[in-house]
């Protein structure tokens, strides 16, 4: 017998169990119905994509891409990968025994690689073939008996180094990533399926898990759930931005979450081949300001690095010591170009028209690189440190950057389902539970076929029915029904079979009555 071991969910992941799952179900249905009322259709994209898709769209300097992605080589040759890692990332071999082992592993790597490529189980890329050739040559250098010292040893070390380096460069399969967000996937799907050919804007929504290797805490998980929506098309009318935000506020209303703040901002536009954007000008100004020694010296290590790589991100730093400095930095709203300013002003008018209250937040730059112009977030004070219920913005250049048609604009948002559920529970207005409508207490072999038949009939009527798989004593059955919170107990025993009449007990008040089988369906229809 193998040793017993108890497994636990991986850190940052969790199980969602009944009765909580009923609220998740309610929320997803509500979100679907709200989004469908705005004419959004569902898109389901894969959970993993090429790593480069995320790196390009989200940006390599973002936290998400830089430190939080679950990335792995997509192949099934883990035994070979292990050997490669031992060779490539192990110690430099010293001494007879270590060299012998090193040689054996390198030879196995070459032989297995040849077997797999000739069987068509591994791609034979020019880079891989070159690396294998170098390992072959290196093997000659580590095959002769070990010299005592001097140039012979240096030659052996050089061969071993070349083998190690070449082993590291071997690629056994594509590098893929569990999606940290879904905008990149939606844009990839939009381009791949030529959705620009369909009439009108494409209004798409998605529901599903995302993966980010963040430090877990309340409201922050490594597998979390998002509901998001994206609008892709040729128009960037501010009415699109406003309608999307309005849709979110309708969802908040349905969930009876009243305590929230909608933050909005415009982060300007990037350079294009046709014209210079206002954001790069702002970024340069910000960088110059942040480089000033008296400011730079007061920044933490992360922000200091970002002064060079992505100064905009310094604006949304949460480090307490940096807040006073950030408050005094120039704001992008002061430097928007005429077009961006007009877009932003119209967005505010559109929101006012829709009676959506908002707060302008010049610091709202968002953590992903694809945004331009409109950015927004909805925060809730009841959530604590992880207070963003959802976030989104415009990303007009992304379709083209990912190889799609020119001139396609996009805007979208994603809400954190985990956090929405917390907020709904905290507001205590919605109580979604699943109840058992009918518990069938059957007693005696004769009653069983009737019990099975009636369970089927009532389930067909969309009632939730619990039918015990084994006979239970009447008292026990009543207790179980009570614990399950069942509304009715349908009693079928010898008496009921003999008299052709069923007994129904209403658990709320204990009232019991007799009823014929024919009247049963109507009885429960009336009791709904
Ligand atoms: P995001 O701001 O990275 O945007 O994520 C959106 C929301 O997902 C956050 O406001 C938060 O509620 C939730 N969230 C993010 N990370 C976690 C986590 N580790 N645990 C729990 N909840 C989390 C995006 O993902 C963009 N794709 C949104 C978008 C769509 N922009 C345009 N279209």
Image (spheres, grey):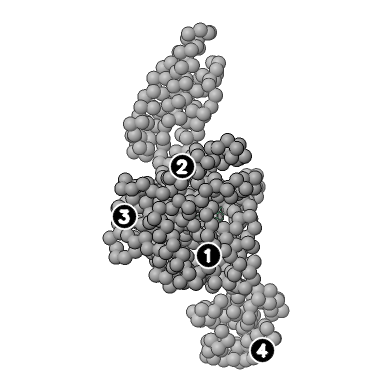
Q: Please state if 74 lies on the left or on the right of 498 as rendered.
A: left
Q: Where is residue 283 in the image (x, y as percent from the top left)?
A: 46, 44
Provide the residue designation for mark 3.
407
Counting from the top left corner in percent of width and height, residue 248 is at: 49, 66
Say few, some or many: other residues with alpha carbon within 10 Å of mark 3 (under 14 / 14 to 19 / 20 or more).
some
Between the C-alphas of marks 3 and 1, the distance is 29 Å
Can you tell which mark lies on residue 512? 4
Quadrant showing the N terminus:
top right
The residue at which mark 1 appears reads as 358
Between disc 4 and disc 1, whose residue precedes?
Answer: 1
- Is label 2 in a helix, a strand or a loop? helix
State the image coordinates of residue 113 (x, y, percent, origin top left).
39, 32
* Between discs 3 and 4, the one toward the N terminus: 3
Question: Residue sitting at 42 percent across and 57 percent down?
Answer: 341
Q: How far apart, in angstroms, are the residues tagged by discs 2 and 3?
A: 27 Å
Quarter of the image for the C terminus: give it. bottom right
Q: Are marks 4 and 1 in contact (CB under 8 Å)?
A: no
């Amino acid at each position: 017998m193998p040793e017993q071991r108890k497994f636990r969910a991986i850190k940052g992941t969790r199980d969602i169990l009944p009765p909580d799952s009923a609220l998740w179900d309610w929320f997803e249905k509500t979100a679907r119905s709200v989004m469908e009322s705005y004419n959004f259709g569902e898109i389901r994209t894969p959970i993993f994509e090429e790593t480069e898709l995320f790196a390009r769209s989200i940006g390599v300097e973002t936290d998400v891409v830089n430190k939080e992605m679950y990335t792995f080589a997509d192949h099934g040759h883990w035994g070979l990968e292990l050997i490669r890692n031992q060779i490539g990332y192990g110690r430099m071999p010293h001494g007879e025994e270590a060299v012998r082992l090193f040689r054996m592993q390198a030879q196995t790597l070459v032989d297995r690689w040849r077997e797999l490529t000739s069987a068509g189980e591994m791609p034979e890329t020019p880079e891989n073939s070159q690396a294998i050739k170098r390992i072959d040559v290196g093997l000659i250098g580590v095959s002769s008996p070990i010299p005592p010292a001097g140039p012979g040893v240096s030659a052996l070390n050089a061969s071993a180094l070349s083998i190690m380096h070449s082993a590291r460069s071997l690629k056994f399969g594509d590098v893929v990533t569990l999606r940290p967000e879904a905008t990149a996937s939606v844009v990839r799907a939009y381009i791949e399926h030529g959705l620009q050919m369909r009439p009108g804007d494409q209004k798409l929504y998605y529901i599903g898990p995302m993966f980010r290797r963040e430090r877990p805490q309340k409201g922050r998980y490594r597998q979390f759930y998002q509901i998001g929506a994206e609008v892709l098309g040729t128009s960037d009318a501010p009415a699109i931005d406003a309608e999307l935000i309005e849709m979110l506020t309708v969802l908040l209303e349905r969930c009876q979450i009243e305590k929230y703040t909608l933050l909005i901002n415009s982060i300007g536009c990037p350079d294009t081949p046709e014209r210079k954007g206002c954001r790069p000008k702002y970024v340069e100004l910000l960088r110059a300001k942040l480089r000033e020694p008296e400011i730079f010296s007061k920044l933490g290590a992360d922000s200091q690095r970002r002064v060079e790589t992505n100064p905009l991100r310094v604006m949304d730093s949460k480090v307490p010591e940096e807040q006073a400095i950030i408050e005094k930095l120039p704001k992008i709203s002061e430097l928007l170009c005429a077009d961006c300013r007009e877009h932003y002003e119209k967005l505010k008018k559109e929101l006012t028209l829709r009676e959506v209250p908002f707060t302008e937040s010049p610091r709202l730059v968002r953590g992903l690189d694809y945004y331009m112009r409109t950015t927004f977030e909805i925060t809730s004070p009841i959530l604590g440190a992880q207070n963003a219920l959802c976030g989104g913005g415009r990303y007009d250049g992304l379709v083209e950057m990912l190889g799609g048609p020119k001139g396609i604009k996009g805007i979208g948002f994603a809400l954190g389902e985990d956090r929405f559920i917390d907020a709904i529970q905290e507001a205590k207005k919605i109580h979604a539970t699943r109840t058992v409508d009918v518990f069938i207490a059957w007693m005696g072999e004769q009653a069983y076929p009737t019990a099975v038949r009636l369970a089927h009939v009532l389930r067909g009527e969309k009632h939730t029915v619990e039918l015990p798989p084994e006979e239970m004593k009447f008292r026990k059955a009543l207790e179980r029904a009570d614990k399950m919170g069942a509304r009715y107990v349908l009693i079928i025993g010898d008496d009921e079979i003999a008299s052709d009449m069923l007994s129904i007990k209403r658990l709320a008040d204990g009232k019991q009555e007799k009823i014929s089988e024919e009247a049963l369906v109507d009885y429960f229809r009336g009791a709904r």
